[in-house]
Amino acid sequence: MKQGFVMAVAMGWAVAGMAQEGTKLEYGSSQTYTQTLVVEAGGDVSVPTIAPVYDGHSWALSTRWDDSNPNALNIRRKMLENGIRGSFYLNSRTPEKPAGSLAQKLTGADECSVGGHSSTHPHLEQLPANTAFRELMANRIALECLTDRPVNSLAFPFGGYQSKDNPEALHGITEAVLRTGYSHCVYSGFVTRNRFLPAGVISTGWQVVPGDRKIEAEKFWASIERVRANEADSRKMSDCIFLGVHPWQQGEELERLGEVMAKLRDWDDFWHCTQTEWAAYAKQRRGTTVTAAAPGSYTLVRPAAYDLGNAIPLTLVFASADVRSAKVDGVDCPIRHADGKTYVNVPQAAQAGVPAKIDETDLEGCCGEFPGLNAKLAFDPATRMLTFTLANTGGALSDGLLTVSLPPACDPGMLRWQRPALANGETWTATTAAPLIREGEYWQGGTPYFAAQLDFVRDGQRGRLFATCTGPAPAPAQPAN
Ligand SMILES: [Zn+2]
């Protein structure tokens, strides 16, 4: 606490009324921290590599079911009976209370998770960029608030992300996806054939379809076999295979789906996971570095779980079976020996975990989950300045990290601010300009939408608070004189 205060004074943040400026957040980057891994081994061991799949499994196996359909609960039951896990991609048309919501029921105790599918299920490629961004961002906020879990993966409504009639749509939707903070998309074409997407920022998987209404088992097994038969090529795109697309199967077809799932359970060396877990694993696999510090001691620089969207441990592979035990910053790591190697699952540090509570402020800046915190986001169209204000009357807050997403016509798309500590009674202001760099009806039509995400720790618990605002709707086009 004291250290945080000294830092704040040194950086000038304690100066009354002074607004802090943010820095551009590169797409796909995340907040990293350092851990020290110490292993006890029978002999010399070399620097471990990162396993492509958690726990050294051969493939990740997940499922993807779209739309807010109550039959999803039956699919979920059938999945769990057969050891299968996965994610439900939901809309958020009308405001809901978390308790009793479909999103919360489908999440359960994290056997499954939810992903974004836009607020109202429109054809995103037919909308102005501002509206497409709002559809994705507001949906992610709503789902996170309903489940108190981060949402890091996306399925486009109608699978739509480009259009012959609107060649700018792919660019605009890509910007919208990146600014929403997604790191995974079930549409592999969006990821692999998209010149607007920076390489390696969004993960995907191999979709295999058992049949939305009628189960076609033979076709299903042939398509999953194709992914495995072309293993080297398949893995270039993803080590994740997933079932989809709609949770429509009922009665006899639901039973037949259950039979496919029962066979899948041990069909290969699968990590049965949600797409949220896979997305987080894939991102930390890309974003972690491991270096030797001393004999038997390694330094990990890895993305924080709250930025990955899930606290799935990272699996390190030692080339020998001589490793007897491993500790990260004094915490025991589970280890496993197989094929003459040692697999070490390194947990995230407790302070870098995922938020336990997530909420969004109302027009007054208040919310139910975090009494004493008042957060507002405001955009001034005259100066094009965006201002985030946080007033804290609810006890000391630490580890503040503010992420702001701007409309697709603006650059930068995302900015970040660090606020190590905010004492009780203190107010913090962060500002940024929102310069327009893209012209024309597609980019500037629709109402601009701005979103702020504040991650923080209070009372020893990690929380996340969203505040949003809109800019003015564009004036209707003037008829020519
Ligand atoms: Zn849909």
Image: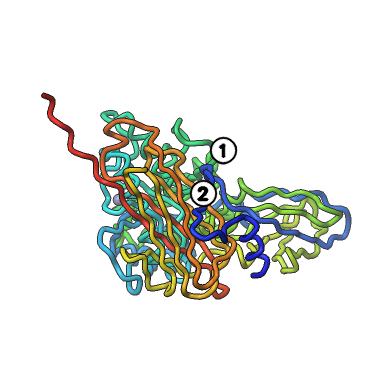
Q: Residue at x 35, y 46 (%)?
A: 133
Q: Residues within 10 Å of mark 2 (few under 14, many from 20)?
A: some
Q: Give the spatial CA distance, label 1 vs label 2.
A: 40 Å
Q: Which mark is residue 119?
A: none
Residue at image x 47%, y 57%?
429
What secondary structure is found at the residue carrying circle 2? strand
Label at residue 21: 2
Choose between 225 and 109: the one closer to the eye: 109
Position of 215 with respect to 165 (left or right) is right
**Residue at the outermost left position:** 481
**Which residue is label 1 attached to?**
236
In the visual, does 466 lie left or right of 347? left
Which mark lies nearer to you, 1 or 2?
A: 2
Percent of width and height locating residue 339: 73, 53
Q: Quadrant of residue 346?
A: bottom right
Identify the residue at the far right of this view.
43
- Left-right relation of 453 to 296: left
Q: Camera-side residue: 58 or 168?
A: 168
Name the spot of residue 122 as percent of width and height, x first: 26, 47
Q: Is residue 423 above or below residue 415?
A: below
Q: Is residue 141 visible?
A: yes
- Which amino acid type is shown beneath numbered disc 1? Lys
